[in-house]
Image (cartoon, grey):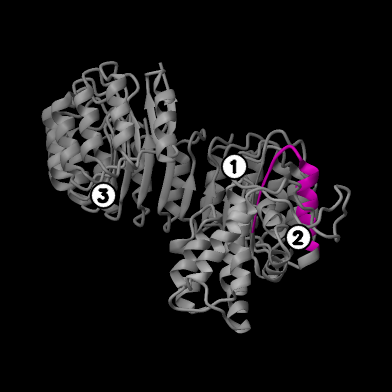
Amino acid sequence: MSQSLSTRNLHETLPKNGAKGLELVVAGGSGRSQCDIGYFHTLVACFKFGTLQTQLSLKPETQNSDNSKPGQALPAPSQPLAAQEPLKQEVGAAADEGMFPPLTSTDLFSLMWDVGAIILEKLDTKEVLLLRSVSQGGRKWVDAVLPFVTHLVCNSDADCTQVERTLCALMQNHKMKIRKFTARFHHQVRDFPALAVMASGCGSLREICLSRSSCVNDTSVCALVRSCPRLRRINLNGCTKVSQSSILEIAHRCLELVWVDVGRCPLVNSACLVSLAEGCPRLAHVNITRCDVGDTAICAIAKHCPELRHLDLTNCPVSNAALLALGRYSSKLRTLLCGANRRLDDTGIEAVSDCVQLKHLLIKQSMMTDDSLKLLVERCPMLRRLDVGGSRCITFDGLGAAAESCPSLELLAIGSCVNLMFEAFSTFTRRSTSITRLVLSSLPFLTDALLQEVVNNCRMLQQLDLTGCIQLTDESLTSLSQLCIHLTTLRLEFCPLVTDLSVVTFATHMSQLSHLAISGCHLVTTGAISFLIDNCPALEFLCTSRSEIPEIARLTEASRNKELKIEVLP
């Protein structure tokens, strides 16, 4: 298979679910390369079976006992055979038309190692088992490709024993050199001992993601870290059973660590983070969102990790002392997220301005004033995303300075900045035409005239939040739909003057609109929303106050075979 097809085009043609993409790869390369018809028959059939399980099912050639042990043949699903002959006829007809000309064995092995590994890496381990059990050809192909797979994905359910057996069999039978492991173990699973077993044979592991795996505990993490000391990225976000024991073990073992996420881990404290900073000086990305840590931990991270580039302190009880340390030691910092914190004022903001490479700053509900904002934007001209929502001390002067000093600003969030006036934002929009994401929620001064000026100057808007802007009417929103044609996300919740006219114009002019929130817009009727669903092909998410809409949408999306998530709020 040609190199251009197997590597350059594969990521563009293969969708995230991994299944139907193989057909695209095959069809797209039919005119440029040749392939063995038998293997492609097997691959197309297997991938269709593996993902369209609501329409097709299969019976594996052989079934293994549920009592199979690691090292034996992989367990196979037991599902009845249905619709296999029509699929074979479909694939056979495609082959008869010359879509799959024969290939040499050299090209076939190129497909296995190059494209095959990328395909399997997009599948869950259970889908790999399903693919392997369809036919003898599928089994041979999967077994040949597995040793070259470097990313393993596992999303478990309540059948923890099955998942454990699957992982152990994959690791021991095929000598996989896994470098990345992604898993999510749901809350029904009480424990996952296979994590330690898998790690014992996977010293090549460099990245592990266990985000929101509530069953993962210190025992599993410590065993994993002991077996894989060369880990560079660890994601434990939302692992509520992980405590300081795991963090201390990581600090002691993983000296090459550069990326760590322990956000939403309530048992993680300042003491263990100090040890982590001292033991892992290469850290560049740290997320400690909603952890009970204070200034001591942040000061240690800033002092011992000179390569720090990303720091998320959202909802952490820190003060100006933490920002002073960052300004002194973290000269390479590019992203700082502090969340809502009224303990931060001009002293801390002025210190952060020494981080001249800063590109993304989020400090909501702080006590910063125009003076510190001016200093910040003057020293950090590379700022692209600025979120100062709820900062009530910012006025016209500060916002005007931001517009003049940061011409490349892409995101601006000034929701609930009640001291801003019409003139301030009018000046800003005329100078910041590059903005693509704008948050103007809960601004009492926002009128149709001001929004019209925003629309005239910011034609490249992709995301806009107008929640709670009670003065807006159909006049400005109609203009918005006609001029901002690239808009994909729009929030209009609790805008009481919005009517059906706005919703209809959205459906007519915004062909790329995928997310729309109009809950609390009580003048919008069911008919307008039905028209929107029927005429907005890109729509994926809709938030509304009409309780009857989900049933209407179900009928509409069934006719279009389209997925649409609907959230109904009072």
Query: Local crowd at mark 3 within 10 Å, few (<14), some, or many (≥20)?
Result: many
Residue 310 lies left or right of residue 467; in this view the side is: right
Select label 3 or label 1 by which is in front.
1
Q: Main secondary structure of the magenta part?
A: helix
* Residue nearer the viewer, 461 or 363: 461
Amino acid type shown at disc 1 = Thr
- Which circle, 3 or 2, is nearer the viewer? 2
Q: Is residue 165 magenta?
A: yes
Image point (27%, 41%), residue name: 373
| Residue 121 visible in the snapshot | no
Give the image location of residue 233, x and y in percent: 60, 57
Question: Residue 36 colored magenta?
Answer: no
Decide which of tag 2 and tag 1 comes sooner along the chain.
1
Q: Which residues are magenta?
A: 152-172
Mark 2 is surrounded, within 10 Å at the Cα level, by few (under 14), some (14 to 19) or many (20 or more) other residues, namely: many
Q: Earlier in the sequence, mark 3 or mark 2?
A: 2
Foreground mark, 2 or 1, reads 1
Whether residue 124 is visible, yes or no, is yes
Residue 14's label in the rendered image is none
Above-or-below relation of 442 to 97 = above
Reply above or below: 440 against 551.
below
Give the x, y percent position of residue 343.
Answer: 42, 31
What secondary structure is marked by label 2? helix
Quadrant where the C terminus lies? Answer: top left
Task: Determine which of the numbered discs, if any, sits on residue 54 in the image.
Answer: 1
Per the image, the residue denoted by label 3 is 409
Residue located beneath label 2 in the image: 170
